[in-house]
Image (cartoon, grey):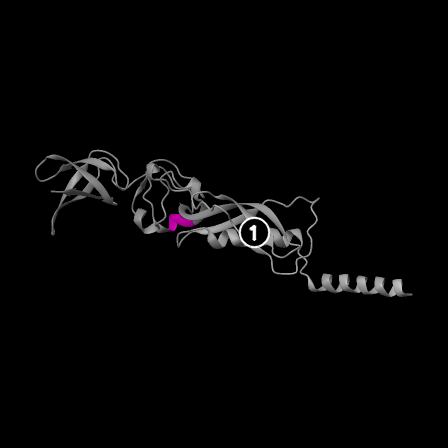
Amino acid sequence: MKLTTHLLCYLFSIMSFTSMANVYDKKQIELLAEEHALSIYPAEADEQLEAFASPIDSRLTIKPCDSEITAQVPNFNSYSKNMTVRIRCEGDDGWGLYVPVQVKIMTPVIVAETYIESGQTITQQDLKVAMIEKNRSRNGFIADIKSIVGSKAKRQIRSGEAIISKNICFVCQGELVTIEAVSNNLSVKTTGVALSDGSYGDTVSVKNRSSNRVIQGRVSSVSEVQIFL
């Protein structure tokens, strides 16, 4: 009888501990790892972040934890989209688990709303904003719709295709442009003819209509070239 009583007490104590402990499943831990990765990863104001945790091994048994589990990234590198999140249960009978997480950075770019013909002047109705992965947005993609309204397509652009600088001209060969000469706080404007195509920031040759001189200028906006004296 005495042995039975001791056994019941022991079983009751185990049951009490188990009921007080926090039980976490693998999905909860994966979500915690993703949330922690998103909370520490730097992002620009117009960017969106998504995190994807690698599935925890199905053969692994997650023991109950008598405290809240914590998340940390040892040796965090803000330049890497891949990180390993350490999940820990503190305490004498605590445990640790490492969860690989990949962060995807989505950034806004301008894409064609409708089919755009080669040589067509681009209007605001032809464009819309879409989010794409940042590592794919390093090829001259554009984020500001207003900056390219009035530019011309140098080739056909399909609906949904990203607008890339090399596929449009802010200044187009043979067309009239405004030449702005800038010196300290003084600015003088005249007109000229573009001798080559150029996108924003490109250096192009322009013939001044007043003097017939050919000058080099930087494309500053649609149909505008800037030179610094």
Give the quarter of the image for residue 225.
top left
Q: Is residue 127 magenta?
A: yes
Query: At 80% from the left edge and 62% from the top edge, which residue is drawn?
Result: 10
Give how far across and how far down residue 13 sits, in percent.
77, 64
Q: Quadrant of the N terminus?
A: bottom right
Which residue in the rendered view is the most extreme toward the front? 2
Q: Nearer the viewer, residue 56 or 213?
A: 56
Q: Is residue 68 magenta?
A: no
- Secondary structure that dominates the magenta span: strand
Query: At 30% from the left edge and 44% from the top edge, which residue is drawn?
Result: 151
Give how far across and how far down residue 97 sits, in percent.
61, 48
Query: At 26% from the left edge and 41% from the top edge, which residue is drawn?
Result: 201
Is 167 displayed left or right of 69 in the figure?
left
Q: Nearer the viewer, residue 144 or 75?
A: 75
Q: Quadrant of the C terminus?
A: top left
Give the quarter of the image for residue 217.
top left
Is 215 displayed left or right of 84 in the figure?
left
Q: Nearer the viewer, residue 184 or 98?
A: 98
Query: At 33% from the left edge and 45% from the top edge, which residue is drawn?
Result: 122
**Residue bearing mark 1:** 33
**Compared with residue 150, is residue 2 higher up or lower down, i.e. above or below?**
below
Of helix, strand and loop, which one carries label 1?
A: helix
Q: Nearer the viewer, residue 219 or 82?
A: 82
Q: In this picture, which residue range is highlighted in magenta?
A: 125-129
Could you tell me the amino acid type at mark 1? Ala
Q: How many marks?
A: 1
